[in-house]
Image (cartoon, grey):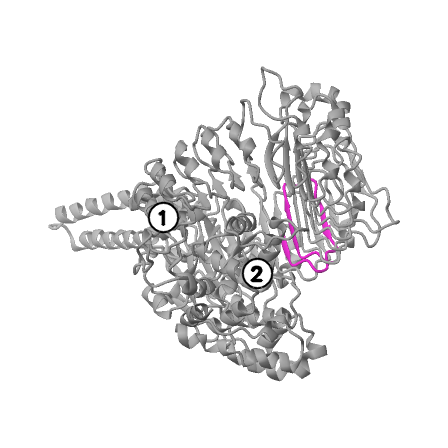
Amino acid sequence: MDGILQKGSELGLLPIDQEILNERSEISLEVIPDDYIVGDIENEANKLIDILTDRKSAKTLVAIVGGSGTGKTTLAWKIHDDHRTRNAFGMIVWVSVFNDFDDIGLLSAVVTAAGGNPKEAKNRTQLELMLASMLKGKRFLLVLDDVRGHQIEENSLEAHWHVCGHGSRILITTRDENVATKLNASYIHQVKELSFQNCWSLLCCNACLDENLHGNTLRNIGIMIIQKCKKIPMAVKIIGAVLRRKEQTQESWQRVYEFEGWSFDDLRGDVQGLTGAIYLGYHDLPSHLKQCLLYLSLFPEGSTIRQQFVTQLWISEGLIDRQDDCSAEKIAEEYYEELISRNFLQLETGNRDITRCTMHDQIRSFLQFFVKDKICSGEVKPGTNGTSSEGLRHVWISGTSTTTNLEEIATVTSLKTVILYKNPLRNQGLDKLFKGLKYLHVLDLGGTEIRYIPRTLEFLVHLRLLNLSLTRIIELPESINYLRNLQFLGLRYCNWLHTLPKGIGNLHRLQTLDLRGTSLHQVLPSLVNLKQLSTLHGFTVNRTPIPEDDPSGWPLEHLKDLNALRSLQILKMEKVSDFSRVKEAMLEMKSQLKDLEICCSNDDRLAEAREDDSRTLKQIFDSLSPPQCLKSLKIVSYYAKHFPNWLPCLTNLQRLVLSDCKFCEHMPDLSKLNQLKFLTITGCSKLLTVEQESAGVTQAFPKLEQLHLKDMPKLVSWIGFASGDMPSLVKFRLESCPKLKCLPEGLKYSRVLRSVQIRHADSLEVIQDLPVLKELNVQACNELKIVSNLPLLEVLTIRRCPRLDDVSGVHYLSHVCITDKELRKLPDWLSIHAPVLQTFNIVGVSELLDRLLPNGEDWEIIRQIDKVYANLLDESPFFTYTKSSGDFHVDQRIGEINKPPVVLGHGTAGGGLSIPDHSVEISSQIGVSRVPMNRISTLRRVVRSYLVPYLIMVMVVMQLLSYYLHNRSTREIWLVQTLFIFFATVFLLLLVFLD
């Protein structure tokens, strides 16, 4: 014990105050909403958006500077996600810059984020050419989050931007102002410090404290704690999560304020206030959560932390306390969720999915301080980077441009975790790795170039997790039979793997067998003895008995004794030969089953035959009877005419996806699913009408948040809603439903509806009466005529809706985007809303855009709008206009001449535009007249090709005449010289015009 205490002292650990830890020990899984933002971020974002969208400068680099945890990324994402930004730029790319990036690594990351594949480039020059082809002519915004000084050479960013469209921008966030200066930032924005009031609101939110109820009694001590946090938002959030688990008394909060760990800032030399807060939050964790959190420092900086993978790693390393009445996976999921609620994990930027998180690099750095001799991650090798191979336990060597030396890793015999995911290694050294690392618990070779697994796999007798997904392996050795401790086996998307060794059937501790995307064609091992399986994906059904000509798959009854299943995917369900055997699978007895996906083969050639067999398939599905505990259900390529009887009875269902059920003619009453949050119905080709049978009796879809309808060519209506239905709906998407004449009635009853997206609804004529809608995006709705009575609508996007002629009752409309290749003049309704619009983005043909120029037919509408962006159909910029300054920039190059931007002066008292002589050339004045720009271009070509050569010839002839007339009268000589001066003047003026 003395040795343990001494070791803890060496690590900087402090004695645990049990009173602090145990005052409120119950686990709280509440996650503070990601969009809860305090401070002056709205004004800061508006200011930076104005700078980024200002076209005065051809290329501008803007930097956001601030310390760790101060909200740089939050501010940058708000700018990235703003409608004004999206309207101003044809392409926006976000890149999180990791510490191990160099200049080439950053270039590769930009190519990847822009949709390219950097692996296709063999060197830096090819990378640059690839990026240039992707950006050519496009107005581009590149956001680089968390740039360090060593990663980008001076002027290296701008070197790649010579092909971008005019107005392209770079936005970076960095902790060091010197980095911004080094990169020649044209504007540096310092993140503002939060006020004490804003910090107090943030603290109360994370502590689940009612300011009005307890604010006065705890505010003073709360402000003192905020001072300890140095008003850093991230520190305040972590401490708020600590206080959430304390009694809401001054004495309890006083102990937090007096905690000795605040001095950890001085020990580490890191960001004052933040590191101390992290340490206090870490100190407050129960011991089991501390171990789990420390293990997460293995993940490389900036990587996505996926819930399923994390829980498997924790279980494999024995970090989960087992309980008799709860599975290890469930306990691990609760640990994961609590780390989110304590703000040690954050949801991915722009993502609301709780199963995908990231860890702030300051937290990761703090954790690595305690485990630096045991964990090695990133593109490094054991024994380097200050990490001793002696005592090293866990390594993660991410994808690199060079192959990792497996023989070197094999010498570190103490390793328990080796993750080489997407590393370009091949089979060389794999045999020695298996022989050398006999104590290995986790081996991840997913995404590597390996083609076979040596028989020496049998040496890894302690292995718990083996991932071979996305590899080119052809077979697994029978020696896998010796891995009796194996719990997780990943074989996803192994396209060359078509069979499994019989030994898999003897892995009695196996909990996960993931075959998703792997097509197995040969005889497969029995699974009946794998009674601990909790996740089984890719379970392919076959007949009973299994036919000799088609030996792949398993009889459905093999699921009978797999009662630990929590997630199950069943494929080729139509192969069940006798529906009476379906009950032998005993799905209704699987009390832990939460996630179920059932798929039939998707083969259009069998469509007619399937329709004849639909009654049999209906009986098969009816016999399945999933358990009531089910939370997620997906049914794919179901071809019966009616859905199974049990579908509307799954009262705990939260997510339902019905995909490609092409012959279903009737939809059951799903409104009875009171817990349903996400509903997607796609590809139901014969569905005509959806009607709520219990309309007005009970509230329909009380918790539904997202509704998605797609690819239903015969759907006419969804009716039967009553007042109060769908109160929680936030987002509605409608795609390719050409006969739907009106939107589902329930939309108008939502109290929180924010976004409606509609595409290819050719019969839809009216969108109206959505009282709280914020954003409306409508595309390719040929019959749409009216958008009305959307009183809170702020953003309206219209693409290819030629008959829309009435937009009214939109009192808060501030952003409009119109894209239409057939449009030749602005719609009349736009003139009504122009004076209140903040931004207007128009994409169309040059004939339309010419009308929007000063003195054009639609200029009076344009001049009333705060900000206008005009682009051609290929997204190349045409012009921008800013009302406040009167600036008008013509971005589209005229003909083959690279023209400077046109700049117009401020508006005159009469409402017109004055053009200062010093800012506009003669040619620019022509560019803003009533003459369309394409005609000006043609005129210049005619002048250049015919008139200029003719004038030169005339002037030469006149010079010759002057020479021959030198003995003639003075009057004749004077006449020739006068004509020569005249033509020379005309020639010079034409040169000015052509410039």
Q: Are marks 2 and 1 in contact (CB under 8 Å)?
A: no
Placement of 19 over or under 146, stated as above or below: below
Placement of 859 over or under 821, stated as above or below: below
Kindly identify which residue carries mark 2. 339
Q: Earlier in the sequence, mark 2 or mark 1?
A: 2
Of the two numbered discs 2 and 1 in the rendering, the one whose residue sits closer to the viewer? 1
Q: Is residue 777 magenta?
A: yes
Few, some or many residues within 10 Å of mark 2 (<14, 14–19, 20+): many
Dot 1 falls on a residue whose secondary structure is loop
Stretch of the chain drawn in magenta = 772-796
**Amino acid type, residue under disc 1 in the picture:** Thr
Real-space Cα separation, disc 2 to disc 1, in angstroms: 32 Å
Q: Is residue 702 magenta?
A: no
**Magenta stretch: dominant SS?**
loop
Q: Is residue 970 left or right of residue 435?
A: left
Residue 411 pos. (x, y %)? 32, 47
Kindly identify which residue carries mark 1. 413
